[in-house]
Amino acid sequence: MGTPLQNRATELLRQSVGDPQATFRPGQLEAIEHLLERRSPLLVVQRTGWGKSNVYFIAAKLLREQQAGPTLIISPLLALMRNQIAAAARAGVRAVRVTSEETNRDDWGRIRDDLLADRVDVLLVSPERLGNEEFVRTMLRPVAARIGLLVVDEAHCISDWGHDFRPDYRRITRILQSLPPSVRVLATTATANDRVVADLQSQLGASLTVQRGKLARASLQLQNISLPGEITRLAWLAHTLPKLPGSGVIYTLTIRDARTVAAWLHENGIDAEPYWGGLDEESGQPGLRERLETRLLRNELKALVATTALGMGFDKPDLAFVIHYQLPGSVVHYYQQVGRAGRALPDAFAVLLGGGGDSDITDHFIETAFPSRELVERILARLDAASEGLTLGELQIKLNAPRGRLDHALKLLSLESPAPLLKLDNRWKRTVAPLAPAFWGRVERLTELRKREQTRMLEYLHARSCLMQFLARELDEHDAPPCGRCAVCRGEPLLAGQFPPTLAERAAQFLQRTHHPIRPRKLWPKDAFSAYQFTGKVSDSLRTETGRVLAIWGDAGWGELVRAGKYSAAARFDDRLVAAVVEMVREWNPRPQPAWVTCVPSLNHTTLVAEFAGRLARALTLPFHPVLRKVRATPPQKEMQNSFQQAHNLDGVFTVTPGVDFTRPVLLVDDMVDSGWTFAVCAALLRQAGSGPVFPVALAQTSKTDET
């Protein structure tokens, strides 16, 4: 017999997991007792699947039974929150979440009322909510004095040194300072090495108690397979997945790759769906992400092809495999993601596909992780000159920088102490505080760390000693023994790296006919078009139709051939690209059917696109009329880095020459498309001149990556 607390905790555990014989794993009960009896902050570093959520939900329930206030859980991912809500219900805990999801917003009023009336045991929020003035004012402040437990899930995100540092997590330390000293604090993570633990101790207090467990996962069977390119990886997936038991996750670095891989698997009769952070918004289907997660949980899908949006905390105990289509940025990222697999299975596969140009993508992520010194100085100078402050939109007008990068820079700077700027009523204002030189020292150190992490990932790919031991040591578990289960320990592949050559040929053909949509722009950037007077919503009468792009710049398929033509001495695209676009247009079959062809003009390469468009028109047996004229030179569109700059760079640049029967639908051809503003402006001018519907066609999309 245990103590009353131990007995009640065990009763709640068995209720939660649905097993009348269940017992706590080593460390779980000790963590619960610490929170109930000792009150000092606790950091739990335990492997994925250990059961950290059982600790905080049972602790929350026990505290409520002692008349404590609600537990506040700060959780980074929507998928993680949804799993936590389900886990809380099993433990008899009344849990609610406040997120930015459209399907959740309608519940905010009811959640606030229940919270204020003390009808909520657990409130889950994202760290971004802590920066929302309305949430802090209407929900957090009214209950702050009676919060029983604060849980920081995936606490490595607080640390600069963590593999997934998130600026909004920095707000947590400020929230802690505003809460009563009696509030219990639990921080949990599976991925904190010694450096991260030391950083967390400095932020959460010297009294922080650290509980560390063994990180090796006995069920995981690790294997690395070197496949240098997109074609070979697609062929391997199509050949291997049908042979794997159960269902799993395939991780990609970009949204574009998630779509491509899922489409290829579908073509091969494998039930897979793409998954990324903005899926609901882009698809126009609120709740689609949640429905896909549910289908995977029920084994109704063979795989979700996902970005890291399906990363930390997604809990499917019988997930049978995790495959990485490309190298993650760090070994710790990799450990975090493969930890989704095999939690309740004796065996699960974790396979890394690597080689080729994977580092190009992670290089891009490293380069954009922190703002440049030049951008920060320009932001501060603009704010110095604006006594009333500037909105993010106004900064886009004044600075040629991507919106996301501006937003990220503002957030990082606002979390400095003292902060050189702050946000008031949606406007960013300069404070009297200078930016401390230590900021740049930290940026340099962390950039170098990310590069070292990338190097270690490459070393892991080619490791000749135990792979699980390599992962554990990267997390500073230096006494981890060899696992005896990975491909290196066994001395033979767990899964064959070969596939039929015919499958690679089919993959190459698939990539050549994988066409990408060019979506219409829907809103003219404010004040971007003083000459054209385009403003507000792009009306149906001026908007492009959805177009098509043949390839991604430089990718397998047609991308390399487009690059070769763009920079060829002959300034001419290969005839094979004409044939490919003809096939694309016929397969696409736009309606109403285009009756003529025109093109976007250039003053730098006067014949390149026009000559290609002419050949395309002849191949389609349509007339070619180069009716658009460029009347003045402009900086290249690729140098314009946000929507305002991209649109404003085109204001007054093009005119339309009359004399053609414009009333019929038209194909509008260009070699490259990135933002789509060139197509939007040219199409609007054509429509104003009386043309029929305008269908954009481009040879290549030039954006390097679409992040998660």
Image: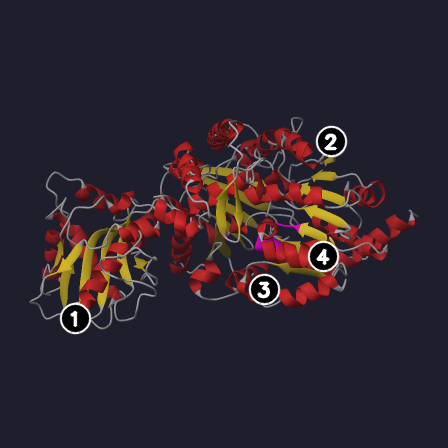
Q: Upstream in the sequence, badge 3 or badge 4?
A: 3
Residue for badge 3: 104
Q: Residue furthest front?
A: 387
Q: Residue furthest left?
A: 659
Secondary structure of the residue carrying numbered label 2? loop
Residue for badge 2: 206
Query: Could you say where residue 255 lies in the image, as x and y percent from the top left?
Result: 42, 51
Kind of residue sitting beneath label 4:
Pro
Secondary structure of the residue carrying numbered label 3? helix
> Which color scheme did the rendering employ for the protein?
secondary structure
Which residues are the magenta region? 74-81
Q: Is residue 51 visible?
A: no
Q: CA distance from mark 1 to mark 2?
A: 72 Å
Choose mark 3 or mark 4, whichever is in front.
4
Choose mark 3 or mark 1, whichever is in front.
1
Q: Upstream in the sequence, badge 1 or badge 2?
A: 2
Q: Which mark is residue 142?
A: 4
Q: Please indicate whether residue 139 sits to the left or right of residue 247 in the image.
A: right
Q: CA distance from mark 2 to mark 3?
A: 38 Å
Kind of residue sitting beneath label 1:
Gly
